[in-house]
Image: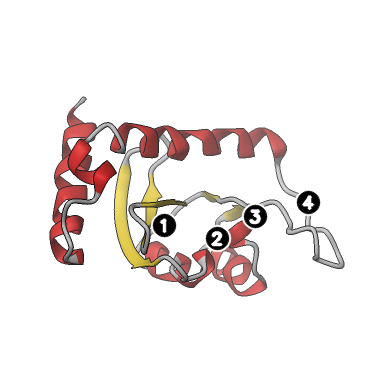
Amino acid sequence: MGRSRGGLTTKIHTLTDAQGRPLRFILTGGEAHDSTTAADLLVGQAPAGVIADKAYDSNALRELIAEAGAEAVIPSIPSRKIVIPHDRLAYRLRNRIERFFNKLKHFRHVATRYDRRAAYFLAALHLASAMIWMS
């Protein structure tokens, strides 16, 4: 899972597969915390593991991932009293979602956020993602 700013007031929250190809998007306002969308991104998925950055470190999300029978590969936030270990080797694979966001920003329409309406911007994301899937 990952996120990227798609403009001054919009965040793109994305679920990708193991190859970094997008599976699902959720748009939120720029002030929304990343972990608030994580559960919605995972609905209906059966992952073996979930790799996410420190912004997704919450007990509720870790429990949701465990209930799905998956492994949570999420580093602990520095303020956590008891540090929860994570698989550092598996965490290296998180760069695949970062590479997806890099590819996404090659689409000028998405990178510059021409659309004022979220529905139109989301449609542009889906079109760009389909093109990324085909490459």
Q: Name the outermost residue toward the right.
A: 81
Nearer the camera: disc 3 or disc 4? 3
What amino acid does circle 2 point to?
Answer: Gly
Q: Sequence order check: which comes first, mark 4 or mark 2?
A: 2
**Residue at point 18% right, 63% down?**
116
Residue identifier under label 4: 85
**How far apart are the alpha carbons under marks 2 and 3?**
21 Å
Q: Are marks 1 and 4 in contact (CB under 8 Å)?
A: no
Q: Callout 1: helix, strand or loop?
A: loop
Q: Which part of the image, by quadrant, shows the C terminus?
A: top left
Any mark on residue 69, and which?
2
The location of residue 57, given as percent across then percent down, is: 65, 62
Amino acid type of disc 3?
Lys
**Disc 3 to disc 4, how far (Cα)?**
12 Å
Q: How is the image coloured?
A: secondary structure
Q: Which is nearer the eye, 122 or 60?
A: 122
Where is mark 1, residue-wise? 46
- Comparing 30 with 66, the one in front is 30
Which one is in front in this view, the residue at disc 2 or the one at disc 3? 3
Local crowd size for mark 1, using a 10 Å CA cut-off: few (<14), some (14–19), many (≥20): few
Point out residue 84 in the picture as x, y percentages from the top left corner. 78, 58
The residue at the point 30 percent across, 55 percent down is 24
Which is more N-terminal, label 4 or label 1?
Answer: 1
What distance separates the C-alpha of mark 1 from that of mark 2?
A: 8 Å
